[in-house]
């Protein structure tokens, strides 16, 4: 069929006709069908993607709803258990039935330990409620990381001792390492949580090690236990809210599944990181890494003398001393640039 056919006025017996090459028609038809097929495939892909996303979202919401309802039903029990022991031990003490001094001391320690557990749970629940409502505010100030870890150990010591734990700590002296910027109360809670987990999940092998060390611009504080350990498939999930490992060894232990998600949130809010290494039935190590306050990264203590050229220059080894000076210059200029 012609695309255009017209009689010419000037030449009455002539007609001009424009026709398309049949091959061009065929190829343009193929192109159109391909374009149409492509569009249909794209639309189907879009629908499929939408369906999968919706399914995932619904599934996640259902999972979260089920975790929340598990949490609510267990929380009442979790709160009642330490309260019942506290009530029982204090009643026995107040009735004067315990004549033996050692036994009395043991009961006091139990009361302290159960109160710390109860306080920890209530703190976790309140923190969780605050973070869900977006009402968490951290007030940062410079602090000595090791001193802060020691504060958590002091809070926890009696409770761990009552359960027969040996705590080995390898902490630097106050002021030995440069400070970190932290909300002190929140960061102490991080370590109380990690210590509380170390105790809960290693009752069979009651030994905990706590260490603070420096790694470049970071300070690392670790809490290691020799307990039940965590399966590798669960290592990523333990920081999710409400997550509790399903194995019987963990299920026997009381908990809310909130502690590590709060710990993770607090550490991340301080520009830090938390790492875990664990092996089933061998133990777990949780390490919190926090950045050293920028001004002190390359100069600590702050009143330390910046080495002068004469201290580095020795007649025997001038090449070594100039290399040191160069590295010194590079470091301070990098700090200046960062400091603006
Ligand atoms: P909770 O201890 O209340 O269950 P957490 O959020 O503190 O909640 O911990 C989440 C889960 O991570 C725990 O249920 C447990 O399965 C696992 N977990 C945490 N710390 C340890 C540890 N030190 N050893 C073994 N498992 C641990």
Image (cartoon, rainbow, N blue to C red):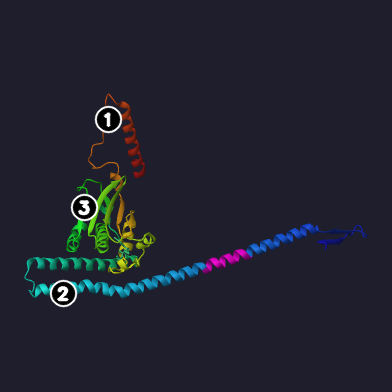
* Towards the viewer: 231 or 310: 231
Foreground tag (1 vs 3): 3
Q: Is residue 169 above or below residue 80?
A: above
Q: Secondary structure at mark 3?
A: strand
Q: Earlier in the sequence, mark 2 or mark 1?
A: 2
* Towards the viewer: 120 or 104: 104
Residue at image mark 3 = 169
The quarter of the picture where the C terminus appears is: top left
* Residue 77 pos. (x, y %): 27, 74
Q: Earlier in the sequence, mark 3 or mark 2?
A: 2
Image disc number at residue 323: none
* Residue 312 pos. (x, y %): 27, 30
The residue located at (11%, 66%) in the rendering is 105
Image disc number at residue 88: 2
Dot 1: few (<14), some (14–19), or many (≥20) neighbours within 10 Å?
Answer: some
Residue at image mark 1 = 312
The range drawn in magenta is 40-51
């Amino acid at each position: 069929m012609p695309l255009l056919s017209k009689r010419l006025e000037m030449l009455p017996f002539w007609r001009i006709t424009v026709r398309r090459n049949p091959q061009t028609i065929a190829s343009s038809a193929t192109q159109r069908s391909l374009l149409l097929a492509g569009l249909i495939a794209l639309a189907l892909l879009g629908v499929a993607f939408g369906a999968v996303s919706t399914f995932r979202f619904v599934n996640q919401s259902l999972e979260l709803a089920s975790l929340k309802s598990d949490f609510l039903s267990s929380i009442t029990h979790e709160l009642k258990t330490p309260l019942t022991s506290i009530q029982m031990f204090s009643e026995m003490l107040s009735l004067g039935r315990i004549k033996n001094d050692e036994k009395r001391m043991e009961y006091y320690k139990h009361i302290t330990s159960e109160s710390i557990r109860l306080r920890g749970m209530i703190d976790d629940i309140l923190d969780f409620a605050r973070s869900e409502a977006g009402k968490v505010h951290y007030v940062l100030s410079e602090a000595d990381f090791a001193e802060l870890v020691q504060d958590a150990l002091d809070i926890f010591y009696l409770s761990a001792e009552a359960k027969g734990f040996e705590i080995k700590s390898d902490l630097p002296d106050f002021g030995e390492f440069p400070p970190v910027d932290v909300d002190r109360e929140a960061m102490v809670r991080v370590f109380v949580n990690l210590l509380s987990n170390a105790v809960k999940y290693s009752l069979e092998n009651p030994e905990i090690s706590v260490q603070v060390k420096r790694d470049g611009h970071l300070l690392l504080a670790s809490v290691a236990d020799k307990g039940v350990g965590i399966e590798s498939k669960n290592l990523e999930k333990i920081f999710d809210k409400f997550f509790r490992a399903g194995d019987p060894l963990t299920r026997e232990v009381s908990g809310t599944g909130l502690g590590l998600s709060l710990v993770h949130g607090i550490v991340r809010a301080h520009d830090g990181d938390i790492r875990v290494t664990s092996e089933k039935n061998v133990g777990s190590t949780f390490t919190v890494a926090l950045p050293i306050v920028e001004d002190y990264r390359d100069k600590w203590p702050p009143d330390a003398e910046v080495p002068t050229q004469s201290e580095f220059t020795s007649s025997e080894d001038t090449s070594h001393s100039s290399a040191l000076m160069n590295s010194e210059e590079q470091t301070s200029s990098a700090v200046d640039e960062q400091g603006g």
